[in-house]
Image (cartoon, rainbow, N blue to C red):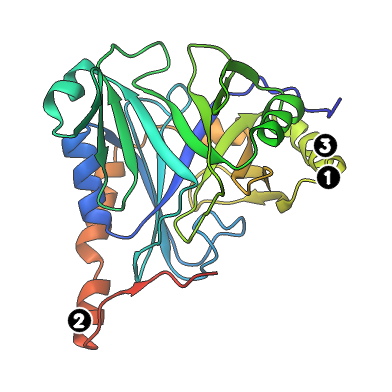
Amino acid sequence: SSGINAEWPLRPGVFKIGDRPLTIDFLVNKLKMHVLRHEEFKEGCDAACNGPYQGRWSKTMVGYGAEDSNFVLELTYNYGIDKYEIGNDFLGIHINSKDLFESVEGELVSEDTKTIVSPDGYTFCIKNVAPTGSGPVSGVTLASSNLTETIKFWKGILGLKMLEQTEDDAIFGFDENQASVKFVKQSEVSHATAYGRVAFSLPVGELPEVERAAVENKNKILTPFITLSTEGKADVSVVIFSDPDGHEICFVGDEGFRELSKLDPEGARLLDMAMGEDKSKEWFAKKGKAKSAAPTV
């Protein structure tokens, strides 16, 4: 036994974005999500939440409902970087909504599913069905270069239930009413510079056990147990490690997360203010060059 027995909800999916106004317009006006909270940081995150960058950055939570009962998106924006190279590691976010299926002009990929790509290149799959108990976002799809190893890790080590399996894919979750993680077989997995992470929350007292289990299983520890602070808000503790294909998984202490993740009625206004004050495009234009793409690390 690994010592991990996951009964924890899937928390936000973390995505780097290069064009904040365009992405927010896409998610809020096209996909009808809401800004749940917005935070600005003067320097890089100790747990590399914003990627391997040390400068100023922001975090915006968007979704269809409260963070503690919905799978939401955590958008990280690094000032001065306007695009990231998309790999094939992340294959799609799945949304169940009859209204969106009608209103969104996407590509019809099957009788009841449309896909639409965000300004930053992320794929959203919209299915013409009503949402379940955990809200419209039903899960995410990631790539796997070796399904046997993926199953061993997500089912055997993390303790998720395997909800479905075929020769080319596997779906994991806790039950049918929560957001799931689907893996689809690819010949290789490339994370490029846009790579994000998924998160689970669990009681903070269990985080050291999770870290121990990861070490025993020789998983790569990206961030050992650490407590992160957000000015004026709750501290959260995290442990971050990766699966066999290098997908980053963040385990966050539930107590701090629930406090930090409360809906901020000022969130949309704070985001608008930050976007209004963001002069990075003008600064780069003055220097006679475009904002820079993320360096490959």
The disc labelled 3 sits on which kind of residue?
Ala
Q: Nearer the viewer, residue 88 or 40?
A: 88
Structural crowding at the residue carrying mark 3, measured as other residues with C-alpha within 10 Å and reported as few (<14), some (14–19) or many (≥20): some
Label 2, secondary structure: give it: helix
Q: Is residue 204 left or right of residue 23?
A: right
Q: Nearer the viewer, residue 38 or 143?
A: 143
Structural crowding at the residue carrying mark 2, measured as other residues with C-alpha within 10 Å and reported as few (<14), some (14–19) or many (≥20): few
Q: x%, y% of residue 55?
A: 47, 71
Structural crowding at the residue carrying mark 1, measured as other residues with C-alpha within 10 Å and reported as few (<14), some (14–19) or many (≥20): few
Q: Is residue 32 above or below residue 79?
A: above
Image quadrant where residue 80 sits? bottom left
Q: Is residue 265 above or below residue 288?
A: above
Residue at (66%, 44%) from the top-left corner?
238
Label 3, secondary structure: give it: helix
Q: x%, y% of residue 143?
A: 52, 40
Q: Nearer the viewer, residue 86 or 187?
A: 187
Instruction: Read off the residue under disc 2.
Output: 285
Instruction: Read off the residue under disc 3.
Output: 213
Tell me how far mark 2 sits from mark 3, CA to CA: 49 Å
- Contact between marks 1 and 3 (CB within 8 A): the answer is yes
Residue extending furthest toward the bottom: 287
For the C terminus, the quadrant is bottom right
Q: x%, y% of residue 11?
A: 52, 32
- Contact between marks 2 and 1 (CB within 8 A): the answer is no
Tell me how far mark 2 sits from mark 1, CA to CA: 47 Å
Residue at (48%, 49%) from the top-left corner?
232
Instruction: Read off the residue under disc 1.
Output: 215
- Contact between marks 2 and 3 (CB within 8 A): the answer is no
For the N terminus, the quadrant is top right
The label on residue 70 is: none
- Going from N to C along the chain, the mark reached first, 2 or 3, is 3
